Structures are given as C-alpha cells and as structure tokens.
Image (cartoon, rainbow, N blue to C red):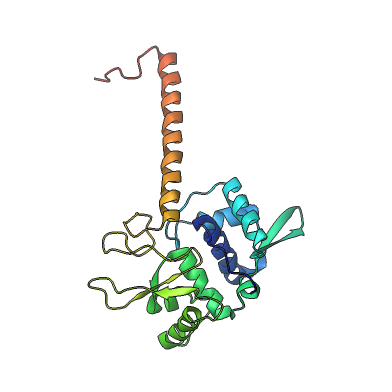
C-alpha cells in the first residue's frame, strides 16, 4: 500500500465489517444491496455498539470507503451492490481480514473470544493460531492494524483492538466494558459516543412525534393533554 490508510469513522468500520462478515456467512447474497447492508449494520446481535443507521448514513459511509478503494460498487439486477477490498488494499491474508472483521463489529476481544466469534467465517485451530495472526497484524511493516490492550483489573487475558479508527481510547472496567451491549463507558471511542448521541437525537424526535399525536387525539376528544385521568 503506497499511502497510509486514513482514520475511519465508526460508521465506516461498521459498513466495512458487515461487508466482510456477510461475504462469508451469506455468500449467496453477496455482494450486498444497500438495504441488506443497512440491515447488517443495524443488527442487534454480534454488534458493539448497537446502532440504528439510516440509508443515507450508510450510503455516505460507502461513498467515503469507495474513495479509499476499500469498497467497490457493482451493478447487478435492479440495484447496486457493494463488496469490500480489505484484503487487496491492506495486503493481508483472509484469516487476518476475518479477525479485523470481528474487531470492527464487536469491539475489543481476547484471543479466545475472537476464536469463538470467528467460527462461522473461519475455524482457527487453536488460540495460538489466532495470536499468531494478531501478532502479524500488530507488527505489520506497512503499519500496525491491531494493538494489544493493557489488561483490565481482574481480567485474566488482555484484549485486542483494531487501529483502523486510530488508537483506541483508554479503557476502564465497569458495566458494558465488554460484550454485545450498547452501553457507553468512559473507554468508548469518540465514534461510539457520536453514534449514541445520534440515537438520543432520534429518540427525541420520536418522542416529539408522539407528543404531537397525543395532542391531536386529545383535541379530538375535547380534553387537555395534561388533564388528570382519575
């Protein structure tokens, strides 16, 4: 790779991770349509954080990734389809692409967690095999793509994180520090915080719509919206 890889946003790594995941888990549907890609980005399982992205947000991430040659657009049937170019752009083997995929979709993981999470895409022989590919990614001559994080207090193993979005923020122990939940911690990246803020804004819009609907219903019934019910 002749030029350094740009720092990707949370939305960009989510789109890239979904494309790489679906290539191996649902090959008959790959490359993906925009609608399928949005559904994959908004999955409630195997995602950390859980997001609620719109088609326009996903399309914007696609367009950005196309500029880096990380995503290619193909025309098939009645809709455009999209595929990733991670292996060709980063020049890494498929096993390394799969490890990056899980880290992009699920956040920091231990080598043991990665081996289990990668099972549908590749069956690593043992944890040592996973660690071997992780070490290669961390020592990559063109630039490290993963980093081994400091072990959290009380943890038995260190976790690994990808570097496609830049150095990860310092982590702290606490609820939501690992797993598939969508709870923010002081160790969340700026991208994750931005995504959570977007979700809050969406919920506020929905609440405003519900209040407007309640007002119309109350007007039709001839009662005040804040009138006591008892």
**Is residue 50 shown to the viewer in this render?**
no
On screen, residue 94 above or below 73: below
Q: Quick one: quadrant of the C terminus?
A: top left
The picture places residue 70, in percent across and down from the top left corner, at 63, 65
Residue at far top of view = 222
- Residue drawn at point x = 62 percent, y = 78 percent: 91
Find the residue positioned furthest to the front: 3
Nearest to the observer: residue 141 or residue 195? 141
Q: Is residue 19 left or right of residue 81?
A: left
**Front residue (pair 186, 3):** 3
Percent across and percent down for residue 33 are: 66, 56
Where, by quadrant of the figure, is residue 26 drawn? bottom right
Is 110 on the left-hand or right-hand side of 56? left
Q: Quadrant of the N terminus?
A: bottom right
Count of numbered circles on the image: 0
Q: Residue at x 27, y 71 (%)?
A: 152
- The image position of residue 216, as x and y in percent, is 45, 19
Q: Is residue 180 visible?
A: yes
User: Residue at 51% of width from left, 54% of height from top?
Assistant: 42
Image point (39%, 72%), residue name: 109
Give the percent coordinates (x, y) of residue 48.
42, 60
Residue 106 quadrant: bottom left
Q: Nearer the viewer, residue 222 or 3?
A: 3
84 lies above or below 206 = below
Left/right of residue 80 with respect to residue 194 in the rendered view: right
The relative height of residue 151 versus residue 7 in the rendered view (above or below) is below
């Amino acid at each position: 790779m002749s030029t350094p890889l740009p720092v990707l946003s949370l939305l960009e790594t989510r789109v890239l991770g979904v494309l790489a995941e679906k290539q191996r888990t649902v090959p008959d549907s790959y490359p993906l349509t925009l609608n399928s890609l949005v559904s994959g980005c908004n999955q409630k399982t195997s995602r950390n954080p859980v997001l609620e992205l719109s088609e326009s947000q996903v399309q914007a991430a696609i367009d950005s990734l196309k500029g880096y040659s990380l995503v290619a657009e193909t025309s098939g049937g009645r809709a455009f389809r999209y595929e990733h170019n991670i292996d060709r752009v980063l020049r890494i083997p498929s096993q390394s692409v799969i490890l990056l995929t899980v880290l992009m979709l699920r956040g920091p993981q231990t080598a043991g967690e990665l081996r289990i999470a990668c099972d549908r895409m590749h069956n690593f022989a043992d944890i040592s095999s996973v660690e071997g590919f992780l070490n290669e990614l961390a020592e990559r001559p063109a630039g490290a793509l993963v980093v081994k994080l400091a072990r959290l207090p009380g943890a038995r193993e260190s976790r690994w994180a990808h570097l496609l979005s830049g150095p990860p923020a310092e982590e702290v122990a606490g609820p939501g520090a690992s797993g598939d939940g969508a709870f923010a911690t002081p160790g969340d990246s700026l991208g994750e915080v931005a995504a959570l803020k977007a979700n809050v804004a969406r919920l506020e819009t929905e609440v405003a719509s519900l209040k407007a609907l309640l007002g119309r219903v109350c007007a039709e019934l001839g009662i005040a919206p804040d009138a006591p019910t008892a």
